[in-house]
C-alpha cells in the first residue's frame, strides 16, 4: 500500500506541474485576446454614408406596364 501511495503522489505531482503550466499559458493567451478585443472596441466606429438618391434600375431591368 505504501508503494502505491508513493507512486500516486509522484504521478499527481507531475500532472499538477503540467496543469499549472497550461493554466499559465492559457492565462497569457486570454490576456492578449482581451487586450486585442478591448482595443477594437475603443476605436470609433465609422458612420456609413447614406445613399444620396434612391437607386434606379438600369434600362435593361426596367419593365413597362402593358409592354410584353
Image: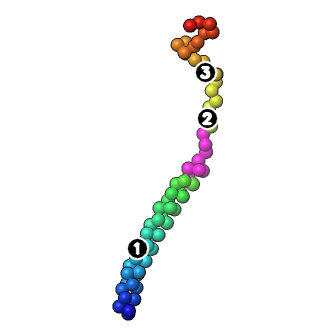
Say if mark 2 contacts mark 3, CB within 8 Å: no
Look at the image and give the residue range highlighted in magenta: 39-46
Question: How far, Cα to Cα, is label 1 from label 3?
Answer: 62 Å
| Secondary structure of the residue carrying numbered label 1 | helix
Q: Residue at x 45, y 74 (%)?
A: 20
Query: Does the magenta-highlighted stretch encompass residue 23?
Result: no
Question: How far, Cα to Cα, is label 2 from label 3?
Answer: 17 Å
Q: How many marks?
A: 3
Q: Which residue is mark 3?
A: 55
Q: Residue at x 58, y 12 (%)?
A: 63
Q: Residues within 10 Å of mark 1 (few under 14, many from 20)?
A: few
User: Between 4 and 13, which is closer to the camera in this rendering?
Assistant: 4
**Residue 51 at x, y percent in the picture:** 63, 26
| Secondary structure of the residue carrying numbered label 3 | loop
Numbered tag placed on residue 66 in the rendering: none
Q: Which residue is mark 1?
A: 18
Query: Does the magenta-highlighted stretch encompass residue 45?
Result: yes
Q: Residues within 10 Å of mark 2 (few under 14, many from 20)?
A: few
User: Between 24 and 14, which is closer to the camera in this rendering?
Assistant: 14
Q: Which residue is mark 2?
A: 48
Residue that sits furthest to the top in the current view:
67
Q: Is residue 1 left or right of residue 61?
A: left
**Residue 33 at x, y percent in the picture:** 51, 57
Compare marks 2 and 3 and give the one earlier in the sequence. 2
Q: Is residue 11 above or below residue 68?
A: below
Q: Quadrant of the N terminus?
A: bottom left
Q: Residue at x 56, y 50 (%)?
A: 40
Amino acid at each position: 500500500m505504501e508503494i502505491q501511495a508513493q507512486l500516486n503522489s509522484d504521478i499527481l505531482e507531475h500532472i499538477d506541474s503540467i496543469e499549472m503550466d497550461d493554466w499559465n499559458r492559457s492565462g497569457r493567451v486570454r490576456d492578449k485576446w482581451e487586450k486585442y478585443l478591448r482595443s477594437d472596441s475603443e476605436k470609433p466606429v465609422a458612420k456609413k454614408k447614406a445613399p444620396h438618391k434612391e437607386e434606379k434600375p438600369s434600362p435593361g431591368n426596367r419593365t413597362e406596364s402593358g409592354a410584353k
